[in-house]
Image (spheres, grey):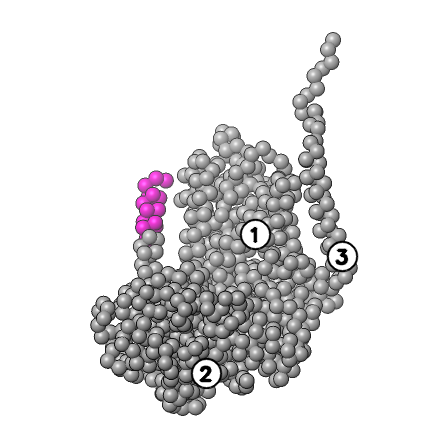
Amino acid sequence: MGKPVRVFAIVAVAALGIAACGGGSDSDSSGSDGGGKTLVIASELPLQGSSADASTDTNNMIKVYLESIGNKAGDYNIELKEYDNSTATAGQWDAATCTANAQKHVAAANEVAVMGAYNSGCSKLLAPVLNQDPKGPMLEVSHASTNTGLTKAADPGEPELYAPSGKKSFARVTTTDDVQGTAAADFASETLKVKKCYILNDNQTYGQGIAKAFEARAKEVGIEVVANEPYDEKATNYTALFEKIKATNPDCLYVGGIYDVNGGQLLKDKVSVLGDNETVKMMAPDGWTGYPALDAQKESEGLYATFTGLATAQLEEQGGAAAALLKAYQEKYGSAPRTNYALYGAAAVQVIVEAIEKSDGTKKGVRDAVFEGEGIKVPAEESATGKEIVIDPATGDTTAKDVSVLIGKDGKQTFVQAQAVE
Amino acid sequence: MTTPAIAASEVKPRRRPQEVAANSLGLLLLAAVGIWLVYELVAHPQQFASLLVAGVGNGALYALIALGYTMVYGIIELINFSHGDLFMLATVLSGIVAASWFSADSFTIGAVGAVALALLIAIVVAATVNVAAERVAYRRLRRAPKLAPLITAVGLSFMYQWVGQRNFMTGSAPKQWSTMFGNDSFSIGSVRVPYTTVVVLAVTVPLLLIMVYLVQRTRAGKAMRAVAQDQDAARLMGIDVDRTIAFVFALGGGLAGAAGLLYLQSVGTTNYNLGFRLGLIAFTAAVLGGIGNLQGAVLGGFLIGILQSLNDGFLLGQQWSMTVVFTVLILLMVFKPEGILGTATTEKV
């Protein structure tokens, strides 16, 4: 022993150190500093872990859209800066990273608005920080954060909690989880005709919220809810859990949460203990859409998922601006986006671009364009969601309330029907 | 003539009232758990049996990991924290061989061959890695204070995780693999028994017997026990201490390899941080059974598996499972610090 071993150890440690340094830092690609003609729109997405594919495609779709308008809004040049709010260690969005990113948005002088976040939990951390930006409040427009409390009264203190400055700054282009949960329960009762549901949630902000919304509506329409219980993300498997559920004999299982939270194992054990999705219907919210890994699982056959908007295939059929964007995307990247949220990401950027056009190019100006006066309107023929987008200045919510139901079929989530929302 | 002094060891110390109280409290708790179990058994016999089967399936996997843990501890008193992560690497490796190379997804002769090959590769690689770790990291720390090898083990576990997190391994998100048996199962009455549970049991029990035989009946085992007692004395007796310890690490690694393959074939999901949770459970199992004791590790593994499963089904629900397991561990440490099958020693770790 001695020398060779020691040399090897030193080389190994040095290599690890270099690798570690190379991995973390995100490149700073923002253009000229402050006040110039280039404004930056930040996107807040989890670029690592299970959601990586969906996030990459959303960023790409935004780039396709920005190219289609010549990267310009009014007199300003627009640049997209991609922030990553996930860590390789977590394999999904990460609270500490979201908080750190929020500070970066506030510190960046030429950043005027944030597109995102994808996860409601992350949005809840971003919103209050952006709201208190001394040069703002800074506008945040989410394409996928559907948690009710972000814009409406849900838990105590909501939604004022996310606008500590007293002026709202969080908007979104999808509908909310109270609407989605209601639609899902209506679909379960009217179309699937189930009588007894067991609800599991992933114990995250979004998952708990949507599970609660589903539970409330299910009880109203006469579905017996056995329990609404969190599952353990790190459990070896869920066999024992499903044996317990089996003993209560439900004809439907609702999982509130995101697929990232060990959803693959959960689905597998559900099918092996309770039976396939024909025998005991399984439903999930939009957090279980847009995952190639989920589609590849044979157990996803017959899994119903709701989506807060229209599915990409529907929008393509409708033609118009969405179809044009999809065509341009297909030409540039050689395939369709792997998530229905990609077009909604573009729609959120449309709202931001519209706001920049109406503004004086400052953070405050961009925010005011959305929340003061009559607010923002994206006409139907331009909208990436195929429908007119109107952001209500009082809440930040969009007037469009679409919920579609998808079903897992031959390794793809295909459109079943649009669920009516009252 | 004076009466001979009574040997000190024959004096039975008077038990203090606190001690009596603590012990009876422990027995009371145990009785309460027993009564609760009997109640559930009578009230829901079928569900109880199903949960028991699920618990035994997981317990056997914990037992296999714990076996490797306790093996190394028994000989050099090193809590090898990297064992769980070595197991994780073996899980991913066996998945790559069986699922990616040979796409074994049904019970055919070809698939059995592929899985056997995966088992062989997993065992050999895990054993090699473990021996290399001993050679490079632990050997030079053998006379260092106990904390040094312990921290080294923690460091190694991070290195293994780093490797596991690469995209050619499992990446940072959970990954699903096709398995030979899939979800197939048979039924006894209306109790569902997955084939994988039977296979895991059929491997764990003989492996335990082989290990016990190896340690207690063979020459190599005799050398191991001698090294465990006193390394210097063993060396004086002509035992090659380095080789014996390397052999123990090879055995421990091999066990991690076998456990990895069986885990993958029965669960089918890998995650780079799998080793942390499972390593913790296996360590708990080893301590519960009496660390350093082979039968104890297996017993502890089964106990934890069954306890978790019954808790998922009857008691507090899944989010409390780890809490229940550690509560039991703490209680046992209070009332019987040496573990269920362990022998009392004055100083450990």
Disc 2 secondary structure class = loop
Where disc 3 sits, the SS reads helix
Chain assignment, label 1: B
Label 2, residues with CA under 10 Å away: few <14, some 14-19, many ≥20: some
Across and down, in percent, residue A352 comes to 34, 77
Taking the image as shown, residue A232 lies to the left or right of residue A293, namely right
Residue at 65% x, 40% y is B335
Residue B202: image x %, image y %? 64, 57
Picture layout, residue B289 above or below residue B168: above
Amino acid, disc 1: Ile
User: Mark 2 and mark 1: span between their CA atoms?
Assistant: 50 Å
Q: Which residue is mark 2?
A: A399
Name the residue at 72% across, 43% down.
B27
Q: Are discs 2 and 1 located on one and the same chain? A: no
Tell me which amino acid carries mark 3: Tyr
Say which amino acid is labelled 2: Thr
Dividing the picture into quadrants, the one containing residue B14 is: top right
Q: Nearer the viewer, mark 3 or mark 1?
A: 3
Left or right, residue B193 beside residue A107: right
What number is the disc on residue B39? 3
- Which residue ends up furthest to the top in the rendered image? B1
The N terminus of chain B: image quadrant: top right
Please name the residue shown 57% across and 78% down the image: A182
In the image, A221 versus B293, the foreground residue is A221
Tag shown at residue B315: none
Which chain does the residue under circle 3 lie in? B
Along the viewing direction, whichever of B163 and A151 lies nearer the viewer: A151
Q: Which mark is residue B281?
A: 1
Q: Which residues fall within the magenta stretch?
A: A1-15
The lab-note entry on whether marks 2 and 3 share a chain reads no
CB atoms of marks 2 and 3 within 8 Å = no
